[in-house]
Amino acid sequence: MVNLRSGRQDRLLVIVVWLLTVVVLGLGIATASPILLVWGVLGLPAAVFLSYVHLRDTRSGPPAGPGGVAEPTSAEPTSADDSPS
């Protein structure tokens, strides 16, 4: 399985999503526009979920093993059949 990690550049996208959500919700409240209120309310859970995923994926690497060294993770299982002859 492929490890997908959020990079630091993704922080800008999270900020843009939050900014657009707050602007749309604010305009919807100020103008009493139902469609803007709907998009603002739908944008809130999306922004929260995006922030959760971004924060989860930008944490430091995998937890350290017994010796204090991070254990490498492999995308492919290893087996005795793969050893060279």
Image: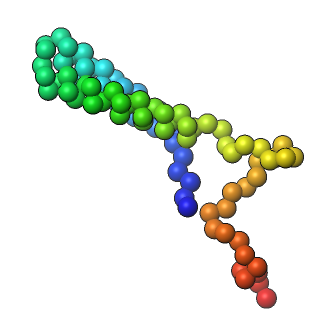
Counting from the top left corner in percent of width and height, residue 7 is at 52, 41
Left or right: residue 70 compared with residue 23 = right
Tell me the quadrant of the picture where the N terminus can be found: bottom right
On the question of residue 8 being in view, the answer is no
Frontmost residue, 18 versus 81: 81
Quadrant housing residue 48: top left
Left or right: residue 46 compared with residue 84 = left
Q: Is residue 3 above or below residue 43?
A: below
Q: Is residue 31 above or below residue 5?
A: above
Frontmost residue, 6 versus 46: 46
- Seen at 80% across and 47% down, the residue is 65
Counting from the top left corner in percent of width and height, residue 3 is at 56, 54
Count how many numbered circles sit on residues in the image.
0
Counting from the top left corner in percent of width and height, residue 19 is at 34, 23
On the question of residue 50 being in view, the answer is yes
Q: Residue furthest top?
A: 30
- Seen at 71% across and 80% down, the residue is 82
Left or right: residue 68 compared with residue 25 = right
Q: Is residue 29 above or below residue 74?
A: above
Q: Residue furthest right?
A: 67
- Seen at 77% across and 44% down, the residue is 64
Frontmost residue, 53 versus 7: 53
Counting from the top left corner in percent of width and height, residue 36 is at 17, 24
- Seen at 71% across and 71% down, the residue is 78
Q: How is the rendered protein coloured?
A: rainbow
Tell me the quadrant of the picture where the C terminus can be found: bottom right
Left or right: residue 83 compared with residue 20 = right
Q: Residue furthest bottom?
A: 85
